[in-house]
Every structure is written in structure tokens, then in C-alpha cells.
């Protein structure tokens, strides 16, 4: 059976990687689906995020990374994916994830499995990592080393330039 771990991964954190690795123990194949979240300001472009996930997941043999363009539910139907797996950190995650799970189920019948995030990563979010890194704080406990380097080089750029702007350039 094939599962998908979708997200915007801007950038990928150890919390995401924990969910992906645990999902890979239960399914024959896991697709890491890198999507756009239209309600969030992007830092890294889609290509950059796909490339970061590919590097971060290289050691897990049954994981592959793919961009998702369009609806996640359609992608699952077109690629014979049986379940969406997402991490849950706290109660407000649950409200957001439950609504998306029920909507995706209604759209194409795809099931969602919600996996509790490992306690050590429960307070980590890509949004906080981006904010801390852009203000030159230390994010090395939360993301792989090569992501720390990518964030540092982005923090040194002139303000206001996002990865998604690069997508359209
Ligand atoms: O990491 P995020 O930001 O919570 O990921 C959100 C993501 C990319 C999984 C979500 O926005 C998504 O599924 N986008 C694809 C478009 C889609 O299917 N939207 C309808 C969701 S019910």
C-alpha cells in the first residue's frame, strides 16, 4: 500500500522527518507530496523544497518526493495512494487537520491517518523556524544541517524576496 505525507515543508523540520520515517514503517511506499499552501508566505521555492526533502529522505529506501500541483485528493486518486498521513502536534492542529481530512474524504474518498508528533518536536513549526532564522537565531536543533545553511544564506539576502517570487521569475 502507498501513503502520502503532504505538506508545504517550508522548510522541512525534524518533526516532519519523524512523521515520514514512521509512516515508511507501515506502508510499502511513501510519497512526500510537496504542495503550495496559498495561505502562507513562502520562503523557499517549490523546486528548492522538493530538493531539500529529497536530500533529507535519501536514507529511507521506500520514500520518494514529488511536487503536488492541484488538489491533494486528485493526486491521491491519480497515483493509487490509499492514505494521507499527517502529524498532529496540539489541539489546534487537530481542528485544521480534521476539516481537511473530512473535505478530502468527501472529494474522492481518500482516508487520512493522523499520527501524534514525537513529543520532542511538538513545539517546532516551519513558521517559527523561518522567523527565527530570518532574525539570525539558531535553528540547528530543529532542521537538518543543510537546511540551516540554506536558511542562513536566505537570511543574508535583501529583505522581502521570497522563494515563491522566484517561482514566477
Ligand atoms: O504543511 P501544510 O502547510 O499544513 O500543508 C498543507 C497542504 C499542502 C497539505 C495543503 O494545503 C494541501 O493539501 N494543499 C493541496 C491543495 C488542496 O488539496 N487543497 C484542499 C485541501 S482540503
Image (spheres, rainbow, N blue to C red):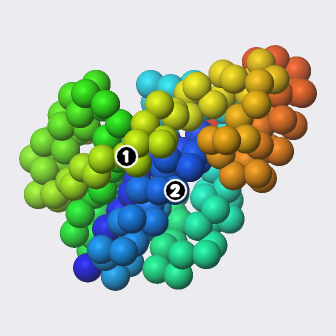
Marks 1 and 2 close (CB-CB < 8 Å): no
Q: Nearer the viewer, mark 1 or mark 2?
A: 1
Q: In this view, does 113 lie above or below 119?
A: below
Q: How far apart are marks 1 and 2 (CA)?
A: 10 Å
Q: Which element type, helix, strand or loop, lies under badge 2?
A: helix
The residue closer to the viewer here, 112 or 45, is: 112
Please give left or right for residue 68 compared with residue 72 in the image.
right
Query: How many labels sit on residues?
Result: 2
Task: State which image quarter holds ligand 1.
Answer: top left
Label located before the other in sequence (1 or 2): 2
Q: Which residue is rendered at x = 58% and y = 25% of the image? A: 128
Question: Residue 76: x percent and y percent?
Answer: 29, 63
Q: Name the residue under label 2.
A: 17
Q: Does residue 61 appear anywhere in the picture?
A: yes
Q: Which residue is rendered at x = 11% and y = 57% of the image? A: 109
Question: Residue 135: x percent and y percent?
Answer: 77, 18
Please give left or right for residue 139 compared with residue 117 in the image.
right
Q: Does residue 46 appear anywhere in the picture?
A: no
Q: Mark 1 points at which residue?
A: 117
Q: Which residue is rendered at x = 18% and y = 37% of the image? A: 98
Q: Which residue is rendered at x = 27% and y = 70% of the image? A: 81
Q: Residue 52: name its quadrant.
A: bottom right
Please give left or right for residue 125 compared with residue 30 in the image.
right
Q: Is residue 54 above or below residue 63?
A: above
Question: Residue 33: x percent and y percent?
Answer: 45, 57
Q: Residue 79: name its quadrant.
A: bottom left
Amino acid at each position: 500500500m502507498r501513503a502520502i505525507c503532504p505538506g508545504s515543508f517550508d522548510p522541512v523540520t525534524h518533526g516532519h522527518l519523524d512523521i515520514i520515517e514512521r509512516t515508511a514503517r507501515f506502508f510499502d511506499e511513501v510519497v512526500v507530496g510537496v504542495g503550495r499552501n496559498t495561505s502562507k508566505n513562502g520562503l523557499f521555492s517549490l523546486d528548492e523544497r522538493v530538493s531539500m526533502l529529497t536530500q533529507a529522505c535519501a536514507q529511507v529506501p521506500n520514500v520518494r518526493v514529488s511536487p503536488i500541483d492541484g488538489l491533494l485528493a486528485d493526486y491521491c486518486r491519480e497515483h493509487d495512494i490509499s492514505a494521507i498521513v499527517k502529524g498532529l502536534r496540539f489541539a489546534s492542529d487537530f481542528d485544521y487537520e480534521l476539516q481537511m481530512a473530512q473535505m478530502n474524504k468527501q472529494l474522492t474518498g481518500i482516508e487520512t491517518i493522523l499520527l501524534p508528533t514525537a513529543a520532542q518536536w511538538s513545539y517546532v513549526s516551519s513558521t517559527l523556524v523561518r522567523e527565527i532564522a530570518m532574525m539570525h537565531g539558531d535553528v540547528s536543533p530543529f532542521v537538518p544541517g543543510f537546511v540551516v545553511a540554506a536558511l542562513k544564506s536566505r537570511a543574508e539576502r535583501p529583505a522581502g524576496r521570497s522563494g515563491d517570487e522566484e517561482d514566477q521569475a
